[in-house]
Image (tube, rainbow, N blue to C red):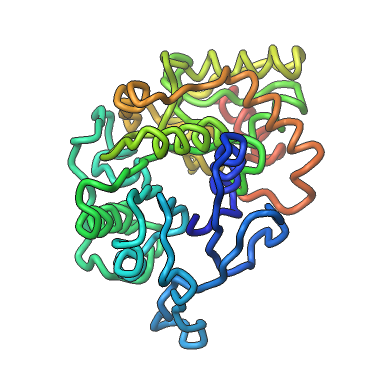
């Protein structure tokens, strides 16, 4: 595991340990260093020093050298050159490279409503070796694409490119999904975003972790979109599931896409689980389902995330989601229009 102690990494390790596998975790030892005390831990630094950060530590891949593993799962790669560096060390030492990419590699994603599958056009940027995501993360998708290319070039026919959409569930550090379980629990009148029949796609981190282990066990290669569900889920179905799971006292006032965009509400930022219909192209998951992907009921994800928000998240500032004051203000303006 390159990484392995953040959000997705632990879900993979837990699923693998439950299936009797052994792991080595290679990382800086900075995020959750006490996790998995019985698992081998190696320390290193994959990041190259960046021009704007001259005091960054030097890259150190020493601990990866001279070892053999059945597979590597790379959860911590964002820059092309750093993937190439790791692949130079590991290409002859592993049989299978699982690279955690992103649906953001697709050029049309959240730009228009074009459906995407694994063959859809991918993003580009002027410099594949740029060491910055850009001011507004505008290079993120292209850099993930170039990381994919680097893995495939180094390990032809031995790479799995997992492209998740929004990963959600207990432990999510982004708060993009956690907003809604917390909002359901608070009750009262909820601002319901966009069109009730707009489709919603995400994947529970525990389902994704278990499926990645399955991909390694099966020897499945190639690109795979990693997103739910095994049927279509609308925004209305999601919200009413949350109401039925957590708080029957919720009511929903539907506010359309144009109003939200006019008032600067950011999709999957200030408003979790919302992409305007005109920019919501469905990502096909047929290849993933054929390769064994399964999806728990969304009620379980909502309930378990709510429990984590209540007991495990702590009181750190929220990274995403709408404040109660902002919600009340928007609802008042919507009704007065």
Q: Closer to the camera, 268 or 95?
A: 95
Q: Where is residue 68 shown, x and y percent of the image?
A: 41, 60
Q: Quadrant of residue 283?
A: top left
The front one of 133 and 326 is: 133
Q: Name the residue located 42 percent from the left edge and 30 percent from the top edge.
A: 227
Is residue 13 visible in the rendered image? The answer is yes
Residue 108 lies, with reference to residue 63, above or below; the image says: above
Which residue: 18% across, 41% down?
A: 121
- Tell me where residue 36 appears, x and y as whole percent: 68, 52
Q: How many numbered marks, from 0 up?
A: 0
Residue 71, placed above or below residue 275: below
Left or right of residue 258: residue 85 = left
Image coords of residue 307 (percent x, y) = 76, 31
Identify the residue at horizontal 37%, vertical 68% (top origin).
Answer: 132
Where residue 231 sits, quadrant-wise, is: top left
- 43, above or below 203, in the image: below
């Amino acid at each position: 595991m390159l990484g392995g102690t953040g959000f997705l990494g632990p879900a993979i390790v837990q699923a693998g340990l439950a299936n009797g596998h052994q792991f080595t975790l290679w990382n800086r030892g900075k995020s959750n260093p006490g996790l998995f005390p019985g698992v081998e831990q190696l320390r290193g630094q994959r990041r190259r020093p960046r021009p704007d950060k001259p005091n960054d530590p030097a890259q150190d891949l020493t601990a990866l050298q001279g070892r053999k593993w059945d597979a590597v799962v790379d959860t911590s790669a964002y820059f092309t050159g750093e993937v190439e560096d790791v692949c130079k060390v590991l290409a002859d030492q592993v049989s299978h490279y699982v690279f955690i990419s992103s649906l953001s590699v697709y050029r049309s994603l959240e730009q228009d409503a074009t459906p995407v599958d694994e063959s859809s056009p991918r993003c580009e940027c002027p410099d594949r070796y740029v060491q910055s995501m850009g001011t507004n993360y505008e290079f993120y998708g292209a850099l993930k694409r170039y990381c994919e290319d680097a893995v495939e070039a180094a390990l032809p026919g031995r790479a799995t490119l997992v492209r998740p959409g929004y990963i959600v569930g207990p432990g999510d550090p982004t708060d993009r999904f956690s907003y809604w379980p917390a909002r359901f629990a608070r009750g009262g009148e909820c601002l319901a975003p966009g069109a009730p029949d707009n489709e919603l796609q995400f994947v529970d981190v525990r389902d994704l972790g278990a499926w990645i282990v399955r991909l390694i066990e099966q020897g499945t290669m190639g690109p795979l979109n990693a997103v739910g569900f095994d049927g279509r889920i609308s925004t209305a179905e999601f919200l009413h599931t949350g109401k039925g799971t957590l708080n029957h006292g919720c009511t929903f006032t539907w506010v359309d896409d144009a109003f939200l965009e006019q008032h600067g509400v950011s999709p999957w930022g200030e408003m979790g689980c919302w992409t305007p219909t005109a920019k919501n192209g469905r990502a096909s998951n047929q290849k993933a389902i054929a390769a064994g992907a399964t999806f728990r009921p969304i009620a379980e994800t909502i309930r378990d995330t709510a429990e984590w928000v209540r007991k495990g998240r702590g009181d750190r500032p929220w990274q995403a989601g709408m404040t109660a004051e902002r919600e009340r203000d928007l609802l008042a303006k919507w009704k007065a229009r």
